[in-house]
Image: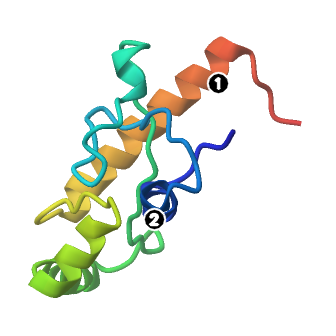
Amino acid sequence: MVIDSAATAIPIARSGQACVLGVTSAARLAQLPSIPTVAETLPGYNAYTWNAILARAGTAPEALDRMNAAVNFALQKPNLRKRLEDLGIAVMSESTPTSVDAFLRTETGKWQRLLREAGVKAD
């Protein structure tokens, strides 16, 4: 058994080399619509991989704005967007440094709470 990212699991699932039991995202994947979500069996379950382009703390706001504009521009390219979506990657349109920061805070809080509740301690 393995939990894998959609980008690497979709081709394997389509080839029939593995039996896919479910997807861990909140919604079914458009690329594998017949595969249920784990949340359909375990309500509230939602775990997924994500990617972000980050910069060092203290980076000048002007540099962040330029990087953000370049990334958002690239993600609007139809060929890139289609390729990412074909890989099962949901593209967040027009993200900003503020929205990415809020997302990271939410994700960090979610996983920190889960680790605390499970009693996981760092060695």
Q: Residue at x 45, y 36 (%)?
A: 47
Mark found first going from the N terminus, 1 or 2:
2
Q: Residue at x 36, y 12 (%)?
A: 43
Residue 23 to residue 79: above or below: above
Image coords of residue 20 (percent x, y):
50, 41
Q: Which residue is mark 2?
A: 11
Tell me the number on the disc at residue 115.
1
Q: Residue at x 42, y 38 (%)?
A: 23
Observer able to see residue 87: yes
Dot 1 falls on a residue whose secondary structure is helix
15 or 32, which lies in front? Answer: 15
State left or right for residue 83 relative to residue 75: right
Q: Residue at x 54, y 21 (%)?
A: 113
Tell me which corner region of the image, top left, top right, bottom left or bottom right, holds residue 87.
Answer: bottom left
Image coords of residue 35 (percent x, y):
35, 37
* Tag 1–tag 2 contact (CB < 8 Å): no
What residue type is disc 2 on?
Pro
Dot 2 falls on a residue whose secondary structure is helix
Tell me which corner region of the image, top left, top right, bottom left or bottom right, holds residue 39.
Answer: top left
Count of marks placed on residues: 2
53 or 34, which lies in front? Answer: 34
